[in-house]
Image: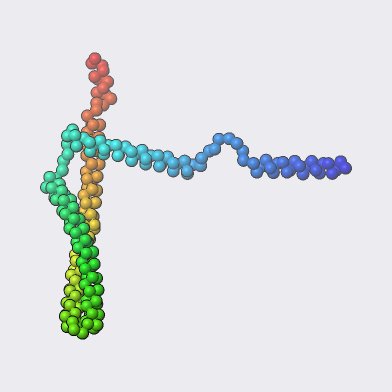
């Protein structure tokens, strides 16, 4: 009986020890080195982005309020404004052409239906056979010419759409990138000028000693 008690006690002690090993221990959680460094890098990126955004915004406001110098190519700026104005005009023409294409398509479909209707009447009305036949041929010819015109208009729409939404749009994106680069350059230049204008430590000490 004593041997059974000792055996049960040993098994229970082993069971409690295995439970204790499986349970998570409380205490401060220590981040691994790699996730911690990644988090620091992300924070540094956010800090740099915020600082650059602030500097660029300050430069834009300074230029618009007339407090800062804005060195640009006036001829290039004029051409960019003309390009933007032309883009609006081309977009207006594109909308008109799309409306014309839609209306012409409906008209061509109606002319084709009228041609079929006149052809049917030509077969059923003997006394007006020639008149209805002539009208049927006329409507079918108009529908055929309308389809040719519709194809030309759709080709024009495709070309203008490529010009507006691809060529001009890509050019304006390049202009935007140029403007962003210009702002960054003048922001850095302004920061360097401000730093150089600040008194150095020896100059500050000399000024304090004089006073």
What is the quadrant of residue 124 in the picture?
bottom left
| Residue under the image location 40 percent in, 42 percent down | 42
Is residue 159 something one can see in this rendering? no
Work out which residue is located at the far left of the displayed protein and give it.
75
| Residue under the image location 17 percent in, 36 percent down | 69
Structure colour scheme:
rainbow
**Vertical placement of 126 versus 167: above or below?**
below
Q: How many marks?
A: 0
In this orientation, which residue lies closer to the viewer: 48 or 165? Answer: 165
Task: Locate residue 28, reporting x and y percent.
Answer: 55, 35
Task: Locate residue 44, reporting x and y percent.
Answer: 38, 39
Q: Is residue 19 left or right of residue 153?
A: right
**Vertical placement of 107 versus 65: above or below?**
below
Q: Is residue 202 left or right of residue 26?
A: left
Query: In which quadrant is the C terminus drawn?
Result: top left
| Residue under the image location 23 percent in, 31 percent down | 194
Work out which residue is located at the far front of the displayed protein and give it.
127
| Residue under the image location 25 percent in, 31 percent down | 195
Is residue 82 something one can see in this rendering? yes
In this orientation, which residue lies closer to the viewer: 78 or 129? Answer: 129
In this orientation, which residue lies closer to the viewer: 95 or 4? Answer: 95
Task: Locate residue 66, reporting x and y percent.
Answer: 17, 34
Task: Locate residue 164, reporting x and y percent.
Answer: 21, 57
Work out which residue is located at the far top of the displayed protein and give it.
211
Work out which residue is located at the far right of the displayed protein and give it.
1
What is the quadrant of residue 27 in the picture?
top right
Query: In which quadrant is the N terminus drawn?
Result: top right
């Amino acid at each position: 009986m004593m041997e059974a008690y000792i055996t049960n006690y040993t098994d229970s002690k082993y069971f409690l020890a295995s439970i204790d090993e499986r349970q998570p221990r409380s205490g401060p959680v220590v981040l691994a080195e790699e996730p911690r460094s990644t988090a620091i890098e992300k924070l540094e990126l956010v800090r740099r982005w915020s600082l650059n955004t602030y500097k660029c915004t300050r430069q834009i406001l300074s230029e618009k309020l007339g407090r800062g110098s804005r060195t640009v190519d006036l001829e290039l700026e004029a051409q960019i404004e003309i390009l933007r104005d032309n883009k609006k005009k081309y977009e207006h023409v594109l909308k008109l052409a799309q409306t014309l294409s839609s209306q012409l398509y409906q008209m061509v479909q109606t002319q084709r239906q009228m041609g079929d209707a006149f052809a049917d009447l030509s077969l059923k009305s003997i006394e007006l056979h020639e008149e209805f036949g002539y009208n049927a041929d006329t409507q079918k010819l108009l529908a055929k010419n309308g389809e040719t015109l519709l194809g030309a208009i759709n080709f024009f729409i495709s070309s203008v759409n490529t010009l507006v939404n691809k060529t001009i749009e890509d050019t304006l994106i390049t202009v935007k990138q140029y403007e962003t680069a210009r702002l960054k350059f003048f922001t850095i230049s302004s920061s360097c000028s401000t730093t150089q204008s600040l008194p150095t430590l020896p100059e500050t000490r000399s000024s304090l000693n004089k006073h």
